[in-house]
Image: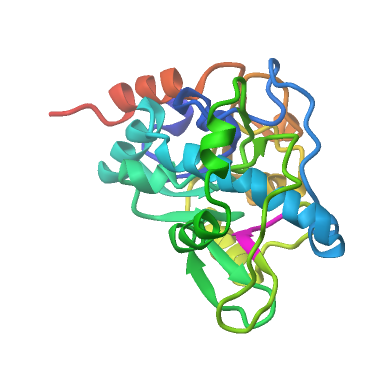
Amino acid sequence: MVRLLAGKAVAVVTGAGMSTDSGIPDYRGPDSPPRNPMTFQQFIGDDEFRRHYWARNHVGWRHMDAAKPNNGHRALAELERRGVVSGVITQNVDMLHTKAGSRRVIDLHGVYARVRCLGCEQLVSRFELARRLDHENPGFIESVAAADGVEIAPDADAVITSTAHFRMVDCAHCGGVLKPDIVYFGESVPKPRVAEAFDLVDRSDALLVLGSSLTVMSGLRFVRRAAKAGKTIVIVNRGTTRGDEFAAVSSHAGCSETLATLLATLAPRE
């Protein structure tokens, strides 16, 4: 792996497996429980489903906000500083690459910390929405926190069953429906964002995939793009991926330990 990447400008694609060492579970890892992520159609088509989602998110986003970058995030940021990594395309919404100090980060699926109105397109911070929801739902967070075993999903959703008493709010500007600024299943990644990611891949010599099974086309397309251009592709993931056939090396290993090795060998301190 080191030999394949040495001397190359490396574009990076990361998935949920990148953040498991920060306490954020992944979707499709070998030890992950079965999950059914919400679709865009469910969110916009059912008021009760949407209210239930927001109740869960009101708890889950706080756990994601409290998560800290792990050694892998920090090593990747350092590899960028030392000129090895040209940029990161992440499928994660946890903002841990940015928190770790990575400078060129393309948040392919959005971020947990912003909320968008589907009516007027106004963006507000998740902190501001939390303030409004706390006012409308006094004691809700405390009642949930008192229950044991609250599970957090990779999209900042908390697994809570009793949410009937939760009250949602609408856009403060136009009264429209509020949605996390996250790309859901059944929704398309904005075209300018995809174009920026393709440009990063095109301008790099190699592509390193970290912690993604590449099950959805959202990430796999960058592997196919790199393969078509004859670029070196290396995949690190605990389990097989849809991109393994295109990779020069597929390593079933953890991201943090692999990146520590790459940092020590590709960009040693002088």
Q: Main secondary structure of the magenta part?
A: strand
Q: Is residue 118 left or right of residue 198?
A: right
Q: Is residue 86 left or right of residue 162?
A: left
Q: In the image, which residues are magenta? A: 179-184
Indicate whether residue 93 is drawn in magenta. Answer: no
The relative height of residue 256 versus residue 223 in the rendered view (above or below) is above
Q: Is residue 222 visible?
A: no
Q: Is residue 247 left or right of residue 88?
A: right
Q: Quadrant of residue 104?
A: bottom left
Camera-side residue: 153 or 27? Answer: 153
Residue that appears at 41% across and 43% down: 97
The relative height of residue 118 versus residue 167 in the rendered view (above or below) is below
Picture coordinates of residue 215 (x, y %)? 76, 37
Q: Is residue 106 left or right of residue 34?
A: left
Picture coordinates of residue 145 (x, y %)? 53, 31
The relative height of residue 217 versus residue 3 in the rendered view (above or below) is below
The relative height of residue 131 versus residue 17 in the rendered view (above or below) is below
Residue that appears at 45% across and 47% down: 95
Camera-side residue: 201 or 121? Answer: 121
Residue that appears at 59% across and 42% down: 156
Indicate whether residue 181 is drawn in magenta. Answer: yes
Picture coordinates of residue 40 (x, y %)? 79, 58
Q: Is residue 111 visible?
A: yes
Picture coordinates of residue 117 (x, y %)? 63, 73
Residue that appears at 82% across and 61% down: 47
Camera-side residue: 156 or 191? Answer: 156
